[in-house]
Amino acid sequence: IISFILSPLPFLSRPCPGPSLAVAGRSLRRTALRSRRRRRPTPPPPFPMADASPPPAGASADASQAKILNVNVGILGHVDSGKTSLVKALSTTLSTAALDKHPDSRKRGITLDLGFSNFQIDVPAERKKDFPGFDKIQFTLVDCPGHASLIKTVIGGAAIIDFMVLVIDVNKGIQTQTAECLVIGEILSEHMIIALNKVDLIPKEKREKKISKMKKTLQAVFKRTKFGGGIPMVPTVAAPGGGLLHKEAGANSGSADISELVGVLVGRLTIPKRISRGNFRFAVDHCFQIKGQGTIMTGTVLEGTVSVNDPIEIPSLGIERKIKSMQMFRKPVKSASQGDRVGICVTNLDAKLLERGIACSPKIIPSISAAVACVNKVRFFKGEVRTDSKFHCTIGHSTVMATAHFFGNEVEAPRKQDPKEEKADKKKDGDKKKKKKKVPKPYQEVQYPAEFDKEKDYAWHEQLLADSKDHPPGSQFALLKFEKPVTCPSNSVIIGSKLDVSTDAKLCRIAFSGKLLSSFKWDPKELETFKIFKMRSRVGTVERLQDDYTLIGKGMFTKETDLTHFIGLRVRLDNGLEGTISSAFGQTGKFKVSFVNRIPEDMIQGTEGKKKKQKRTIHSKITLLLKKYVFATDRKRLLQ
């Protein structure tokens, strides 16, 4: 072996003093091994952000150089309305989680998680001026589950979309989850179109009439929503084969309908607002590991821009990693900006620790345990949204339990009616006329404040109130105490739901929505800074007039009450006349009320005293209203 190794080396044929031939052979073998170790291994193939699929027919060789506008389109609707079939008919490139790839999804026959896929089209010639600088439009489709138990996944998916397609089974119309998807659309989306799916199941002779009738019904419903009665409605056949149309027109019967849907989608499309400046924020929806590559986080860029080799933080895990590489639907990229669907590869991260969450620029997003939010009651929610109740609060992809305390402007919220009186009123109304069916109020746009004003006084609400003249949209707030920390920026959209309600109840479970304004620590000192009060009242009666400017009152206090705390507080008579408690009168709890102006003569009445002496008085109650601050540590402090 040694002679074979040494034979091709001419310099060893000369006599060489020093080490023996065996030692020289070992040295050469070591050199050869070192050189093999230094050789760079062949780089592994790019990580599979999507399944291998051929490029679209007719794609040009320089397609990779084309400037592409990415638009995220959410596909929402009731379970079994044909959402995934519609996505399959539209898509040309599939992600690692598209078309129900989860084993449980295939086993149960329903979508259980978010699925992502896309298709591209050339910018139509007639719309070139609306999309300056862009050659192609890429539609990233977000396939959301429709089952009632997965509504929090739907909310997380809707938070990243620019445009919404609501899929409705034309044979069934609006169902429970359709209504919840509509509510989510009003909260999170600015644009929507309706796909009337499964028209192939209607007999040909009845089809046109049935579709027309369904459109009229839906127009009446959507007239009272954010999107209006003129919302586009497109009949579609997402999966031809199960109905009569397939037998009549053949296997390609759905292509024309899909083309019409794409045409309407392009016709209603506008360039989404993108902000490339600022800190990077990324919504992670899937995380998996590839041997020899690293851990892949797939998701959507919510804000800012990111590039290869940039450091990023995963706040929920408290770790920082450097970006190794990135892809957008199988194509390597060097950077990504707001709205882009991208896969980010990092090293030294256990994929099992992160299923969903946020990745961002280091040190920009805190984990919060309590927050104040501006909130509005969802008008489709039929129950009461009570203070001190627990709700499932969804912020992005995270859903946690939180206890809510509601409050609003200084107009006192109406108190709940006594159950006996309420029952009597209902019976009385039932005798007069039949109870009318409640119709949800029309949609009102909400203007949320930029920040929370801690200097103002706010009234405590026993429940979140529906929008009204006294409580317009944007005037009610909630203190939220989360059961576990949530990682989110301060301006995040929040949705509160009652997901513990039975799915068989056929009720909207989304109770309120709003915007986080600030975070705080839930302790007595922090809570005292919120000037939230409850109104308390004491009522007495007028005993007599002492003079034209003073009266004596009784029945408001007991003889044990220390009246020094109440001197200087304002009181009011039944007719609205206001005075001030000036001093105590005797030792039995009576008190004096002084008025700035003379008491009007028309209010004064004479009564006969014990010694047939005329006593002047006023037949009126005396009401003392006090503000009791809910979180005040000084309970004896009285304010008005």
Image: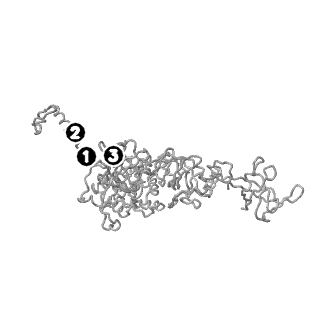
Looking at the image, residue 20 sits to the left or right of residue 100; the answer is: left
Residue receiving disc 3: 101
Alpha-carbon span between mark 1 and mark 2 = 20 Å
> Which residue occupies 79% across, 62% down?
549
Label 3: few (<14), some (14–19) or many (≥20) C-alpha neighbours in 10 Å: some
299 and 126: which is toward the camera: 299
> Which residue occupies 21% across, 37% down?
33
Residue type pointed to by label 1: Pro
Residue receiving disc 1: 43
Asked whether residue 107 is in view, the answer is: no
Q: Please tell me which of labels 1 and 2 falls first in the chain.
A: 2
Residue 620 x, y percent position in the rendering: 76, 58
Q: Quadrant of the C terminus?
A: bottom right
Q: Which corner quadrant of the image does residue 26 belong to?
A: top left
Residue 24 x, y percent position in the rendering: 16, 34
- Circles 3 and 1: CB atoms closer than 8 Å: no
Residue receiving disc 2: 34
Residue 624 x, y percent position in the rendering: 71, 55
Alpha-carbon span between mark 3 and mark 1 = 28 Å
Which of discs 3 and 1 lies nearer the camera? The answer is 1
Q: Secondary structure at mark 3?
A: loop
134 and 345: which is toward the camera: 345
Q: Secondary structure at mark 1?
A: loop
Answer above or below: position of 341 versus 108: below
